[in-house]
């Protein structure tokens, strides 16, 4: 006896950027790694610098989001903070506060 099998009409649209391989699945951006993405961050990190005419990011050319300059600044702040903590710890050690 043959059973009728119902199927859904589910479809998905997939677009891949030829420049950076970022994905859009049903209009939702995903990084090449598969993590959910942010189009403005993608623009700031990749598209605005390297996108070229093949870039498919709708936010290419927009200012904002994450940039390499911003990340470098975050690192400098983090390194400065860590250095200050280490210097403070060394001072405490020299003064015998860790005994």
Image: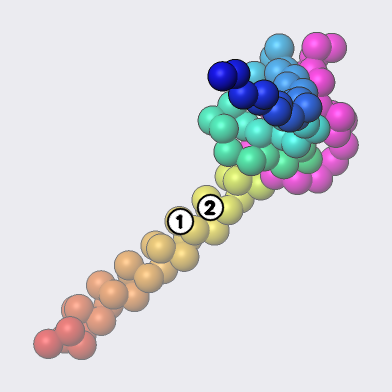
Quadrant location of the C terminus?
Answer: bottom left
Residue beneath label 1, please? 79
Mark 2 neighbour class, 10 Å CA radius: few under 14, some 14 to 19, many 20 or more: few
With 79 as the anchor, is 62 left or right in this view?
Answer: right
Q: Is residue 3 visible?
A: yes
Q: Is residue 22 visible?
A: no
- Is 37 magenta? The answer is no
Q: Which percent across, then down, holds residue 91?
A: 27, 77
User: Based on the displayed image, in which of its 4 quarters is residue 9 positioned?
Assistant: top right
The residue tagged with tag 2: helix, strand or loop? Answer: helix
Q: CA distance from mark 2 to mark 1?
A: 5 Å
Which segment is the magenta one? 46-69
- The answer to whether marks 2 and 1 mark residues whose Cβ atoms lie closer than 8 Å is yes
Residue beneath label 2, please? 76
- Seen at 73% across and 22% down, the residue is 14
Mark 1 neighbour class, 10 Å CA radius: few under 14, some 14 to 19, many 20 or more: few
Please tell me whether residue 97 is drawn above or below residue 71 in the rendered image: below
- Seen at 32% across and 67% down, the residue is 86
Foreground of the two, 7 or 91: 7
With 19 as the anchor, is 9 left or right in this view?
Answer: right
Q: Which percent across, then down, holds residue 20?
A: 66, 19
The residue tagged with tag 1: helix, strand or loop? Answer: helix
Foreground of the two, 35 or 12: 12
Q: Which percent across, then down, holds residue 63?
A: 85, 41
Q: Exactly how many numbered labels are in the figure? A: 2
- Seen at 58% across and 38% down, the residue is 35
- Seen at 78% across and 40% down, the residue is 40
Q: Main secondary structure of the magenta part?
A: loop
With 83 as the anchor, is 99 left or right in this view?
Answer: left
Please tell me whether residue 88 is drawn above or below residue 41 in the rendered image: below
Quadrant location of the N terminus?
Answer: top right
């Amino acid at each position: 006896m043959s059973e009728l099998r119902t199927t859904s009409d589910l479809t998905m649209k997939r677009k891949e950027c030829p420049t950076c391989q970022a994905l859009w699945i049903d209009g939702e951006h995903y990084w090449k790694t598969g993590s959910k993405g942010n189009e403005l961050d993608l623009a700031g990190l990749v598209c605005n610098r390297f996108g070229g005419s093949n870039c498919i990011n709708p936010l290419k050319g927009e200012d904002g989001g994450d940039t390499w300059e911003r990340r470098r600044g975050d690192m400098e702040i983090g390194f400065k903070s860590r250095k200050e903590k280490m210097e403070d710890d060394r001072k405490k050690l020299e003064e015998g506060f860790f005994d």
